Image (spheres, rainbow, N blue to C red):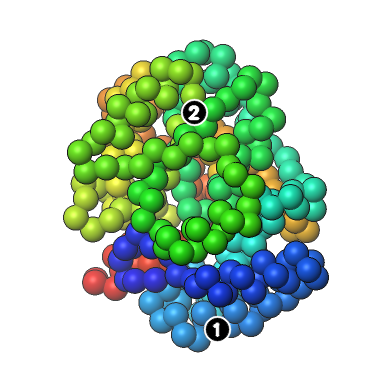
Amino acid sequence: MAAEWQGKSRGTVLGYKIFVFFMKKVGIGAAYFILFFVAAYFCLFSKDSTKSIYYYLKHRLNYSKAKSFINIYKSYYVFGQTILDKIAISSNLSHKFTYESDGVHLINETLKEKKGGILISAHVGNFEISEYFFGELEENASISLLTTDIEHTAIKDYLDSVRKKSNINLIIIKDDLSHIFEVNAALARNEIVCITGDRYIKGSKFLTEKLLGEEAKFPAGPFMLASRLHVPVLFVYVMKEPKKHYHLYARRATAKHRDAQALLKEYTESVSWMLKKYPLQWFNYFDFWSSFKK
């Protein structure tokens, strides 16, 4: 990872192929075993991301030096597990996992209002498997994900070849802002639009707010868009628990209309609460708080 978020994650097609082979031929446990060595590799050779996660653990969670170093390794390991779980769940292995939810009724209530809704999440936990939970909604809900679509194409193509086709629609963020019309059209059809709100890309508009006691930059777009539309806004996270178990949390935002800053503050408070429950599931491996420049 770079010191600043560049919009792309690390990894190679070969690496994914090795994990998928062991997961399908030997079992998920075998793939987890390989992660012990992969996590160690990242600790030793991913200087920027290791430095970033150390700052998070030591200075934002106030861990001791020893505890911070130990949890750098644990963080990489849990992150690897969430990636493998995402592939497994979308590749006919969802029965190997168990699930529970806290707040799904809020999503159902949103759909019953018949004006769509916006879900704002973060790069914590494993939100990309939320589709499993959405399949259990009382009403037939169509889900759209607002994305930059600038991940590695080769990896994306390979994963698409081994996974079931997703029912989630993609709305690509475009410079001409035409994606806003797609978002409005989806909401008009009583659909749910999902956005992540925690990765600011250098050069884009941003808002600042405190997260875990320190100010950071957040992309302005998700909060300005969500605050200006007359639709319910929810914060949703899917967190990994022990023993292949996942837990969805959903909370409804209460910020006033057109108050993007208040919505962002409410969002950062919800993310902070989640990280205190699941401290190892912060997966922003870059200089999130611009701490290296201070």
Identify the residue at horizontal 55%, vertical 19% (top origin): 111
**100 shown above or below 118:** below
The answer to whether residue 231 is visible is no
Identify the residue at horizontal 46%, vertical 64% (top origin): 154
Image x and y of residue 254, in percent: 43, 26
Disc 2 crowd, CA 10 A, few/some/many (<14, 14-19, 20+): many
Q: Which residue is mark 2?
A: 192
Between the residue at mark 2 and the residue at mark 1, the CA separation in whole angstroms equals 39 Å
**206 shown above or below 176:** below
Identify the residue at horizontal 37%, vertical 22% (top origin): 185
Q: Secondary structure at mark 1?
A: helix
Image side of residue 207 versus residue 27, left or right = left
Q: Amino acid at mark 1?
A: Tyr
The C terminus - image quarter: bottom left
Q: Which is nearer the N-term, disc 2 or disc 1? A: 1
Q: Residue furthest top?
A: 113
The answer to whether residue 83 is visible is yes
The N terminus - image quarter: bottom left
**278 shown above or below 236:** below
Quarter occupied by residue 138: top right
Relative depth, front residue between 24 and 145: 24
**221 shown above or below 242:** above
Identify the residue at horizontal 42%, vertical 73% (top origin): 49
Relative depth, front residue between 7 and 264: 7
Image x and y of residue 64, in percent: 53, 76
Q: Amino acid at mark 2?
A: Ile
Q: Secondary structure at mark 2?
A: strand
Quarter occupied by residue 130: top right
Image x and y of residue 128, in percent: 56, 48
Disc number placed over residue 41 in the picture, else none: 1
Q: Residue furthest bottom?
A: 44
Disc number placed over residue 230 in the picture, else none: none
